[in-house]
Amino acid sequence: MRKFRLVKGLLKVTAPTMLSTVVLFVGASGNKPQASSEPAQPAELRQANRHALIESYGRLPLSFEANRGQSDPQVKFLSRGNGYTLFLTGDEAVLSLRGQGSRVGDQGERRPWSFVTGQLHRAKDQGQGTTDVLSMKLVGANRSARVTGQDELPGKANYFIGSDRKKWRTDVPTYGKVKYEGVYPGIDLVYYGNHRQLEYDFVVAPGADPKAIALAVGESLYGPPETPEHDAAVREHHKGAPLRIDANGDLVVQAEGGEVRFHKPVMYQEQPSVVSGQLSVAQTGLRRADHEQRTTDTPRSTTQNRRFLDGRYALTADNRITFDVPGYDRSKPLVIDPVLVYSTYLGGSGVDTGGAIAVDSSGSAYVTGSTNSTDFPTAAAQQPTLGGVGNAFVAKFTPDGSALVYSTYLGGSPGSGGDGGAGIAVDSSGNAYVTGTTHSADFPVVNAVQPNCGCPPPGSSDYATVDAFVAKLNASGNALAYSTYLGGSGSDEGTAIAVDPSGNASVTGWTASTDFPAANALKPTLGQGANAFVTKFSPDGSTLVYSTYLGGNGGDDRGFGVAVDSAGNAYVTGWTSSPDFPRAHALQPALRGSFDAFLTKLSPDGSALVYSTYLGGSGSDFGFGIAVDSAGSAYATGETSSADFPTANAFQAGYGGGLYDAFVSKFSPDGSAVVYSTYLGGSDGELGTGIAVDSSGNPYLTGFTISTDFPTANAIQPARRGGFLDAFVAGLTADGTALVYSTYLGGSDRDQGTGIAVDSSGN
């Protein structure tokens, strides 16, 4: 029986008789994928698989990074959750919250597709969207309280931000909890949580007074600390903050970009039957039945040793928050535990977006994408600029998805234009290769073939002109083997990367630069519009084996997928509107619609086209993902609006209707025949974004759908959740005539699959 598991945005699909697939997806759902009530699945799937799918992501602990110079000196620890960044100072928790529309620099949103218009276009820059900076200040607290990280996690954080290597930070430790000792007399404060929510506990020692705790919550003000002027400004500002306690006892803060809710606090005391006389911080994760959706890392049996109290929030005349704790035993420890929930931010607008995924031989998953900067807001502003619009990131997960091995940030310094990762590959030694797009003039470069950016200088209002970048990280993720710009004076975007057994990295994307770096090029000059490009780097990144434009002279051409075989041949797919796109041994020698997909195979030295062909019908057709098997057969996926898209030996021979269908096409090694070609879609619209193939020739693809009748088989989620988009994951038999499985994957809003990978061992 096939099993599904969701791990931090990765869906892992396992089967005893088939290899595993790992899918990268992004979502804006207020609800994570929920267990379906439909009885179409075996009991094992309904129980074990769905439970794992729902719970694995949410139960990953929040990771608190020690500040080693990657943020403002006031910050002791920082953490990212879904929709926010948390900064912990000596006496304040500062939350940078992104509201709806905060997707600038989001590589997933830069994908040039749209179901809204039914036409291919690049998403426009929407500006920085809504950003609120909210603070929870500990009024009258001990500003010299000892702040320590606890429960160190295996993952490390690395920062390659800006071109000044002295400011790079590597092997930054991460922790599951942060403890403030003696923040008030006899009172400790502990922050922890998971990716569903942030929790903090006040741990009150016997004899200590919980009335000493006072919080000021509001939109944050910054200035020189510990001055009468600053403290007066904070008091006046917080006095007017929109706070209320609702009928459920929740504290509600209304911010510009959304509602922030502090759940009614859970309060409890340990009973004498507890073996240890000391309150364990690890036990503060335990909750009553009505709070069991929270962290539960302590055995359930310990609930019998706790007395829960009916405590509540209280607001003072000057708008400060205190805790009303009736009828508690002052001779025993007391725990006060509120929970922060962001009703608009969580699931409403993610600030971390996955662009691509790769898997190594041990089953570890590597992800790239874009994320908000960790720059701490130091100015008095409700909507500060946080490090430009974001940086690229590279993250490595353990094979079981239970922990991060490393998380590395890659991009320009605060104030730069922003960076996003779009493609990733991994070699046999565990080195990660990344490509994407940068607007940063100080992107970190090492052993670069192109050390300077063709993008505008910092402060420019030109956000359209960008460069591609290519970077290689060592197996620990804490050093750059090489990192370089790739582009000319126009716009250039890297979209996909692949690495051959010798360590040569092949990159594709598109360029509008007449001076894009060319070497041993089949086509050394730019056509009339934008052209795709294919660039191959030597293993150490010091040399371009070849670099060529790929396109015609009468339209636009863009590369979106690249794969390489064991001999070093590169396989590229994308789309073109050029009637003179270069062809060789073409199965389809002419452009049939407004846009056609293309499939091109280049020789190892780039000197010849092994084959190159259009792929499409009379509508619009776009290639987005490509894979190659051990025999040299290429597999492509994308989208088509053509009712006459070429099909052969198809699982779905007819167009499903609506805006687009996904497609899957397999070509023979020499490109002379289509082994099979099939639609995959329902009546409204689908797009295939990524494809992978196992050692038996079974293809796996992901993408997204707006159809309620998308074809499913052995599905963990057989129906759409009601949001605008759901991701999908599908596997076909080796001959392409049947579905091994096919499932929706999504919640109540928007969810997109962006990449998929298959390892060689079945993990």
Image (tube, rainbow, N blue to C red):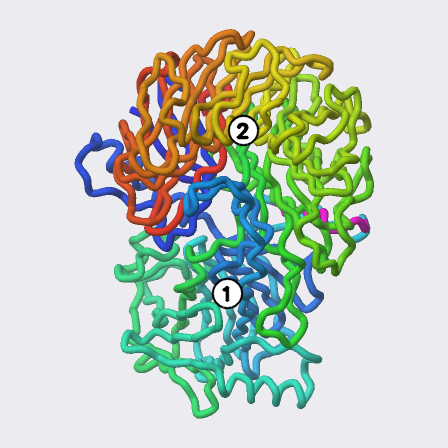
For disc 1, the neighbor class at 10 Å (few under 14, some 14 to 19, many from 20) is many
Between discs 2 and 1, the one toward the N terminus: 1
Q: Which residue, given by chain and number where applicable, does mark 2 sit on? A: 359
Q: Where is residue 650 in the image (x, y as percent from the top left)?
A: 34, 16
Helix, strand or loop: magenta stretch = strand
For disc 2, the neighbor class at 10 Å (few under 14, some 14 to 19, many from 20) is many
Q: In this view, does 370 lie to the left or right of 12?
A: right
Q: In this view, does 25 lie to the left or right of 540?
A: left
**Considering the numbered disc 1 on the image, is that residue within a helix, a strand or a loop?**
strand
> Vertically, is 38 above or below 42?
below
Question: Which residues fall within the magenta stretch?
Answer: 156-164
> Vertically, is 686 above or below 388?
above
On residue 190, which mark appears? 1
Q: Kindly report the distance in space between the C-alpha atoms of the residues bearing marks 2 and 1.
A: 36 Å
Q: Quadrant of the N terminus?
A: top left
- Is 159 a magenta residue? yes
Q: How many marks?
A: 2
Residue type for callout 2: Val
Between 91 and 551, the one nearer to me in the picture: 551
